[in-house]
Amino acid sequence: MSQEKVLMKGNEAMAEAAIRAGCRFFFGYPITPQTEVAAYMAKRMPKEGGTYLQAESEIAAINMVYGASSAGARVMTSSSSPGVSLKGEGVSYMAGADLPGVIVNVQRGGPGLGGIQPSQSDYWQATRAMGHGDFQVLVFAPSTVQEMADLAYLAFEKADEYRMPAMILSDGMLGQMMEPVVLPERVEQLPEKPWATTGHKGERKHNIVDSLYLTADELERLNIERFERYETVKAREQRAETFMCEDAEIVLVSFGATARIAHSAVVRARAEGIKAGLLRPITLWPFPVDAIEGCMGCAKAFLSVEMNMGQMVDDVRLAVNGRVPVEFFGRTGGIIPTPDEVLDAIRKLAGKGGE
Amino acid sequence: MAAITVDDGFCKGCGLCVDACPAHIIELDRSRITAKGYHPARLIDASKCTGCCSCALMCPDVAIEVMR
Amino acid sequence: MAEQKQGEGRVVFSRPKSLLPVVTNYCPGCPHGIVHRLVAEVIDELDIEGRTVGVAPVGCAVTAPDFFGCDMIEAAHGRAPAVATGVKRVLPDNVVFAYQGDGDLASIGMAETVHAATRGEHITVIFINNAIYGMTGGQMAPTSLPNQVTQTSPYGRDVSTAGYPVRVCELLSSLDGPAYLERVTVDTPKHVRQAKRAIKKAFQNQIDGIGYSMVEVVSTCPTNWGLTPQDSFAWMRENMLPYYPLGVYRDVVADGFADAAQAAAARNADCPVAHPEKRAEGKEGAR
């Protein structure tokens, strides 16, 4: 494996990794702060024999993804928060038709048109309600430019493996940031997709890609089967990184760009003698409940640090299930929390925890 | 000699074939009801059928086969 | 029986192979079945079932995937042209068609329709225009006629508040992308034959790489119009055909062009940036 490091923007590293993962079809629509992904794909795809198509809307883009995925291709679309809302319809249909595909959300502040500064306020959308109906999507939360590349690559593999949409939940900070990155090797062989609508060539019964089931019994059965698959995903695919959690009494839980700030705050808290640690979820769905459980031995309190009004904190509370206090600290609207602010929150909690 | 056969499993008794037949030799059979509850079309005078296919062209359910 | 021996058993009309032997969910007398059969006959005659992928709409034809023998995809409401675009870009050698109704194509999916057409996607679109939402029980459609009574225009479509119907062939003919646009109907055997020729051309154009092709079929909805199938065709002839005249709205081949791209180039011939080759010639001349 080549270990050559290149300096790249997060959005571009992610796009290049997608190409190396065998993605040859990209359908998108311009929106800040993800436009570099589209621009990179527009430049690179023709040279890879692939297709970059600027759709008339995010709705059209996700439905082109639906079509390309039906035809068996590795395919991607990217957008930022307001545009991702528009994609919700198509993601629900993909989930209902068991179609893989990668959707990128380089989050910005909301609701509505919001702002163009970084945010993590689409956590609920990504993990709870990407569209109507009973379904989940895989959600990966990169924290570095290297992870933008690695998780984009992994997202294609896992989407195909479980036949479900996968999302890269990034933010404007990671998208715009430049860091050295080792790009993944090109994928050698793509998985067979016997279910794809590629034309039956007279060799098999016709394939149908569909999410319509008018018989309630059948629809319930399919949903139950899908949720059994989700249980497998939960058992196998939880990913998290821990830092100084072995003896941590105050466990910060933070993902994406915010985790980098939380990391600094933990280092400074340790310097002050506070036994703090950081648990960084890498998969937001499935949420790394096992990693939370691993901290329960020493943890006296959890602190969820996010760039929103408090969304992931719900999942931390569900995992902790009332055993110790779970608090929240966050900034929103495009404000990035400072290490000082986070350290203050840790100190307060340490005081509380010591009572 | 030409003839048509109507598949009662498909015929929904809409009567578009009745109107389309230039020889006026198709009718809905009021004496029979198909499994789905329709009066199916039937040929009433095979000797006049020319096998022109007008009935079959208009049939939305491809219930009619034409022989010539 | 003796006189029947000669020729008996020579079937001259039967179910096309690519139309599965399944009873459709369409109401008695619904022209959807006729158009389905025509599409299947064309697929059989062109011998393309094995490489055809159909995209079904939301509307009465939502169950079309169960009726066609080729690979089929069910799209979200109005999104069939985008889904078909995705498929065609991945499988350029396959034949991809979208089958859509008026609400699907001309209301919720208008953006997808117009943009697939203006991109000149190499797809075939079959458009059923019966001026009503059938599946949901007879609401006003984008193609419902002025004063037409529907469940959601109970006093008749009031154009002062609900606006005017959309003429899709005319609308799309203003674009450079489409190669072929024709409006047909299926109310008589003669018209059914004409409709089949149009549908065949729309598929052949795709195979030949000529460009985006759409056939609009002016149709009926006996159930929601509250008329017999026969009276529905009469109402359609009387009211719809004057508003939606039958005919060819664009045919780049008939106009003498090789394909849609060539026709578009001729149409925008006076635009310098669209024709760098001419600008180069002009500069040479100026020197």
Image: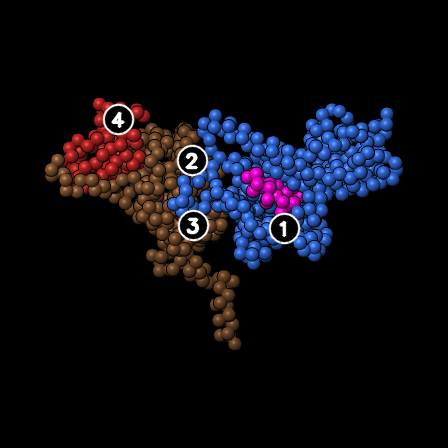
Residue at the disc numbered 1: A17
Label 2: which secondary element: helix
The amino acid beneath tag 3 is: Asn
The picture places residue C63, in percent across and down from the top left corner, at 41, 35
Are the residues at dot 1 and dot 3 in contact (C-beta closer than 8 Å)? no
| Distance of label 1 from label 4 (alpha carbons) | 63 Å
Question: Label 3: how many residues lie within 10 Å, few (<14), some (14-19) or many (20+)?
Answer: many
Chain letter corresponding to the colour red: B
Chain letter corresponding to the colour blue: A
| Segment colored magenta | A151-170
Q: Kindly identify which numbered label has been placed on residue A84.
A: none
Name the residue located 38 percent from the left edge and 40 percent from the top edge.
C68
Are the residues at dot 2 and dot 1 in contact (C-beta closer than 8 Å)? no
Determine whether C118 is above or below C131 in the image: below
Chain letter of the residue carrying label 1: A
Q: Kindly identify which numbered label has been placed on residue C94.
A: 3
| Distance of label 4 from label 3 (alpha carbons) | 42 Å
